[in-house]
Image (cartoon, rainbow, N blue to C red):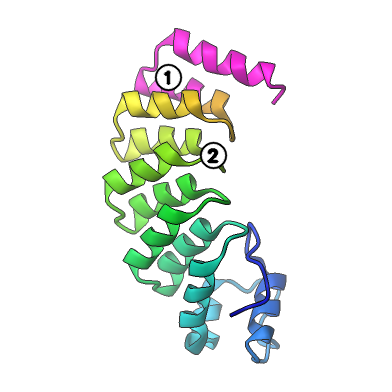
Amino acid sequence: MSKLELPVSVDVDFARHWIAEQGEDTSVIDDDWCYPEFKKHFPHLLEKWFAFIEHATTGSPAIAAYLAGHFLGMPRERVYAVIEKATTGDPAWAAYWAGVNLGMPRERVWAVIEHATTGDPAIAAYLAGVILGMPRELVWAVIERATTGNRARAAYFAGVYLGMPKKRVDAVIQKWEEAGE
């Protein structure tokens, strides 16, 4: 297993380090390298990459899994499992995108968003309400409970587009402002 820790955002420098750690020549990796090039040049490393993501406890394994599913063909159930168990990064955002682009069942998306304690579950809830039909009361509850991310923006948009009562919107915004964010 890799000695590297998964960062919040996988960039070209991290990719070079991880691929070099696997004993591969990194000279094919340009500064504009991205997932399709990884799949093209290193298809034999895909399973190792998927396992690395599945065992990650740092960074944003949920986002990495979503991207691996979207661009590299990581099996969907494996993607969903990583998203559902993630406790770092932004699992709610990854769940939303997995619901939109990878067919993650809505109830599983909603459960991740509802229980997320890192990232931006409020914005993910708002978007899931608009795009994936997440029940409005659940969206509002997530926004009100969220302790990370941009709750004020989510509350504002939920008020405008999902009918969140003004009193509830104002309470979220006031709490957010009092926190100095």
Left or right of residue 2: residue 17: right
Quadrant containing the N terminus is bottom right
114 in relation to 159, above or below: below
Residue 51 sits inside the magenta stretch: no
Q: Amino acid at mark 2?
A: Asp
Q: Classify 75 as above or below 1.
A: above
Label 1: which secondary element: helix
**Residue 66 rendering spot, x and y as whole percentages:** 45, 60
* Residue 179 image position (x, y, % from top left): 68, 21
What's the magenta bit mostly, secondary-structure-wise?
helix
Q: Are marks 2 and 1 in contact (CB under 8 Å)?
A: no
**Nearer to me, 62 or 68:** 62
On the image, the x and y values in percent for residue 150 come to 58, 31
Q: Residue furthest top?
A: 167
Q: Who comes first in sequence, dot 2 or dot 1?
A: 2
Q: Say whether residue 165 is magenta.
A: yes
Q: Residues within 10 Å of mark 2 (few under 14, many from 20)?
A: many
Circle 2 residue:
120
Taking 44 as reference, is 50 above or below it?
above
Labels in figure, total: 2
Q: Nearer the viewer, residue 86 or 133?
A: 86
- What label does residue 100 carry, if any? none
Q: Which mark is residue 160?
A: 1
Magenta segment range? 155-181
